[in-house]
Image (spheres, rainbow, N blue to C red):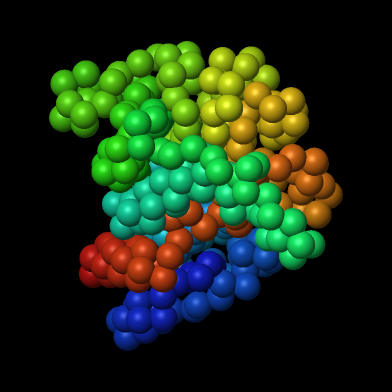
Amino acid sequence: MILITEFMDDTAVERLSAAHATTYAPELADAQGEIPARMAGVQALIVRNRTQVTAALLDAAPDLKCVGRLGVGLDNIDLDACKARGVEVMPALGANTLSVAEYVVTNALVLLRDAYQAQDAMFAGNWPRATCSGREVGGRVMGLLGFGANAQATADLARAMGMSIIAYDPFLPADHPAWNNATQGEIGDVLAKADAVSLHVPLTDDTRHMINARTLAQMQQGAVLINAARGGVVDEEALVAAMASGHIAGAALDVFETEPLTQAAAEKFKAVKNLILTPHIAGVTQDSNVRVSALISDLVLDRLA
């Protein structure tokens, strides 16, 4: 039996259903308390980032063999509890890399150009040409905190736009080929030298609020920040303050400390300009959804064979 608690491509759901009894219930992402009662007999659980796969949930699923993650982040899954119970965790590695890379580079272009929020002024009869000419990305520096697959794909696109790359990743070996086209630096080096900083780190005790008042102050005057990693990596209050002061010229946030972003939590962002907010979709396009869903369905079917 397979339980799917978040959205998945229809073709992949149909393929799973043809092989096993499958319950497709994406509404459960908004009703987490109902999931344990649905786990009896479930051998494969398929989730995205909202379903919390906790030890308690696993205790309600004695037949569970695997968890398919429609994406790559695993902070919503208790990996230790899964390992202790012999439950295999299977992320969709590589399937949404291009989507994330395109998201980052698109936002770097938009934020540095700072020309795409002039509609209200124009509707009012103004012609704010002098205040939104902005900057080109060509010749500027993309800084990447974390240099895994998504960041490396981002670097490839950024270089194609004429940017140079500086990155920090203490886990990527110094002889990895990715460093051939990027400068390796410490966090402070990346922040100080980059015109656009993009975050590509998991949320851990070490990375929580790694972007804070102190590290934001290390960034170049007028730099922009892009976070399509995890919301808790950025101290949102500190970012708003740095943008309000003019030190940080713009930001794109796809992830937030609290998700979904509530109206109350969003209120603080209304005080700043050149800000792009998106609802955790950097890695989700029509194309990547097909790839991610197909990969996870393959992995689940192999595991249950």
Q: Residue at x 58, y 21 (%)?
A: 221
Relative to 141, 216 lies left or right: right
Residue 236 x/y as whole percent: 69, 34
The C terminus lies in which quarter of the figure? Answer: bottom left
Q: Nearer the viewer, residue 305 or 295?
A: 295
Task: Work out whether 28 lies above or below 116.
Answer: below
The quadrant holding residue 292 is bottom left
Q: Residue at x 56, y 75 (%)?
A: 25
- Residue 295 rendering spot, x and y as whole percentages: 29, 64
Residue 272 in the figure: left or right of residue 230: right
Image coordinates for residue 126, horizontal then vertical, percent: 74, 56
| 198 in relation to 186, above or below | below
Write down the quadrant of residue 245 in the picture. Answer: top right
Residue 22 showing in the rendered view: yes
Q: Is residue 285 left or right of residue 267?
A: left
Count the marks: how many?
Answer: 0
141 lies above or below 64: above
- 269 displayed left or right of 277: right
| Foreground of the two, 77 or 242 | 242
Q: Nearer the viewer, residue 212 or 247?
A: 247
In the rendered image, residue 67, in percent from the top left (x then y), is placed at 41, 57
Residue drawn at point x = 47 percent, y = 42 percent: 108
In the image, residue 11 sits, relative to residue 242, either above or below, namely below
Is residue 229 visible in the rendered structure shown here?
Answer: no
Q: Residue at x 26, y 26 (%)?
A: 182
Question: In the rendered image, which quarter contains the N terminus?
Answer: bottom left
